[in-house]
Image: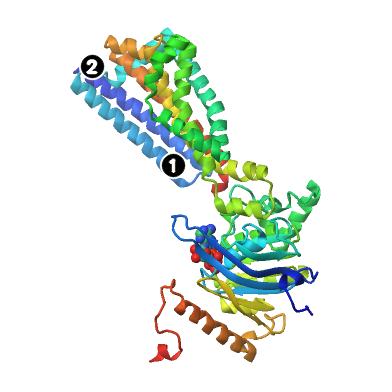
Amino acid sequence: MMSAGDPAERSGDAEVRVVLDRVCKSFAPAGGGDRVSALQDASLTVGSGKFLALLGPSGCGKTTLLRLVDGLIQPDSGTVHVFGAPPRPGPDIGFVFQSFRLIPWAKVSRNVDFSLRDLGLTAAEREERTRRVIKMVGLTRFANAYPAALSGGMKQRVALARALAPEPKVLLMDEPFASIDAQTRELMQIELMRIWTRRRPAVLFVTHSVDEAIMLADEIALMGPSPGKVIETVPVDLERPRWTYDTHAEPRYVELRKHLSSRMRQFVLSDPASEFFGRDLGSPDAMGT
Amino acid sequence: MALLKREIAMLRDVLQSCSSAAVRTAIALRNLCKPPDSFMIAFYRIGFFALLMALWQVAATRMGSNVLPSPLATWQAAQTLVGEGQLIVAIGDSLTVYLSGFAIAIIVGVPLGVVMGGFRVLGKTLEVYVFALAATPRVAFIPLIIVLLGLGVEAKTFIVFLGALMPILINAYAGVLAADEELLEMARSVGTPRGRIFTNIVLPGAVPFIIVGLRIGATIGLINTVVAELYTAVRGLGGLLAIYGNTFRMAEYFVVVLTLAAVGVIVTESLRYIEARVSRWRDV
Ligand SMILES: Nc1ncnc2c1ncn2[C@@H]1O[C@H](COP(=O)(O)OP(=O)(O)O)[C@@H](O)[C@H]1O
Ligand SMILES: [Mg+2]
């Protein structure tokens, strides 16, 4: 078990991969004007090999939090530690972006290989690794295709393969399945679980879907908007693998789902930035009568 | 009247051989597994060509051959000009000036635009001057160029270079600046060093812009070739244009105009072909 105390201190613990402690981040809007606060006093811990879902309505700073953890941007205040030190972007931290971000003029294999260029591997090792990862996501037949020829689900597999190829110990995923159709999404979720069980990276998985969070995560960090922060952290004590039984019928699932959904609805209704601000849609009764 | 009839008959023959050639080409294209569209496009293009020829014939008949030569008269003039050799010599002269000016503009413009895009301070510093120069009519520099370089090939080449340079440079610059922010962040995220981000993400992303620049540069370069040949030592296709235009030999004049159009089409179509080759990844 982790010792209590300063989270930054705890990050020295080999079991803890990611620690955010009272992180604040604001942006200067492109058009000028006051700075927009994206995160305020956000704190979070992800243990080694743990799967943490970051659940929150859109605009509450989820993407910003992932970019901070990858070291792509720096916090205004507070500390972000990955492996006990401020993170630097690189092969130790994998990032699966919401919009795939494949290089359009490079074939699938070259897209995957792109994350292996700076690991000091020989060309043969890189080729072998690329082949293996592409096989793992089931795209061997498409290794020589250009991204334009792939469906959304396949593009996201390539992005996943690229993130996994350097065998990162921390994997950041930003709503990776949000733009994929429901059937493909469920298969992708199962596939992700299979890969995660085998490789066991610490995962920070952003989603705004309550069901997705419950099906995947060990723990759910609920984020609220304006400004973004982590409101509460809920453990998901449902047995794995969760696709082998009727998870949705479990009392714990129903309870979690009800709690998280109502919190999510509350956030949206009480967020002045939301289009639903002040509407009386908060209680289930409001719909029936 | 008899002459007119003969011309119409000639025209019909020309059109018929054109259209049968068009059908053959279109079938050949279709056999190359092109989408069926290109079959129809080729057909429409030939059809439009026939329409143009017919309009030309009608206009020529109406206006008289002193103003507008008929297609047949133009065709005969072309045969004479080719036979006597002056057209070939003129094409050679013009192409030398045109292609070397264009080539130097590429060699200078692309790297300069890319470097300006890569080093933002340099780009911001120089861009005002580049835009100012691009907005100045290049004809304004011709007297200065003549004073500096004389009336020969060097001056002509420089005029072509100056015209083609700006669109090539500005498009290369814009292409680098338009690099996809999301891809750049992805590359940074996997730990790609800056230099490789530039060569693997920024430059390939700028290629479509650069090719647009080359196409505009090619067109302006051709215009400037003619301008240069009119303003400096009268030679090449521009020179023939001046000679036949001033002496009202309209059939010969038309041959030169059509030759220039053909050169323009060949160069821009070649660039389009190159563009299709380098952007094959767009095809599904
Ligand atoms: N680069 C940026 N520049 C300006 N504002 C930004 C930037 N990134 C995020 N924001 C703002 O910060 C807030 C949180 O954004 P984001 O982290 O993308 O939220 P989420 O991923 O939860 O939808 C939003 O209000 C957004 O407009
Ligand atoms: Mg987001």
Q: Residue at x 46, y 61 (%)?
A: A34
Check mark 1 vs ligand 2: CB closer than 8 Å? yes or no.
Answer: no
Whether A289 is drawn above or below B54: the answer is below
Q: Position of residue B276 (x, y in %)?
A: 53, 40
Q: Are marks 1 and 2 in contact (CB under 8 Å)?
A: no
**Label 1: how many residues lie within 10 Å, few (<14), some (14-19) or many (20+)?**
some
Quarter location, residue B52: top left
**Mark 1 / mark 2, whichever is N-terminal:** 1
Q: Does any portion of residue B101 appear in the rendered image?
A: yes
Cα separation, mark 1 vs mark 2, equals 36 Å
Asked if marks 1 and 2 fall on the same chain, the answer is: yes
**Label 2: how many residues lie within 10 Å, few (<14), some (14-19) or many (20+)?**
some
Q: Describe the element under mark 1 as helix, strand or loop.
A: helix
Quarter location, residue A81: bottom right
**Amino acid type at image mark 1:** Phe
Q: Nearer the viewer, mark 1 or mark 2?
A: 2
Q: Residue at x 43, y 33 (%)?
A: B131
* Residue under label 2: B65
**Chain hosting mark 1:** B
**Amino acid type at image mark 2:** Ser
Q: Pick the quarter of the image with the N terminus of chain A.
A: bottom right
* Residue under label 1: B39
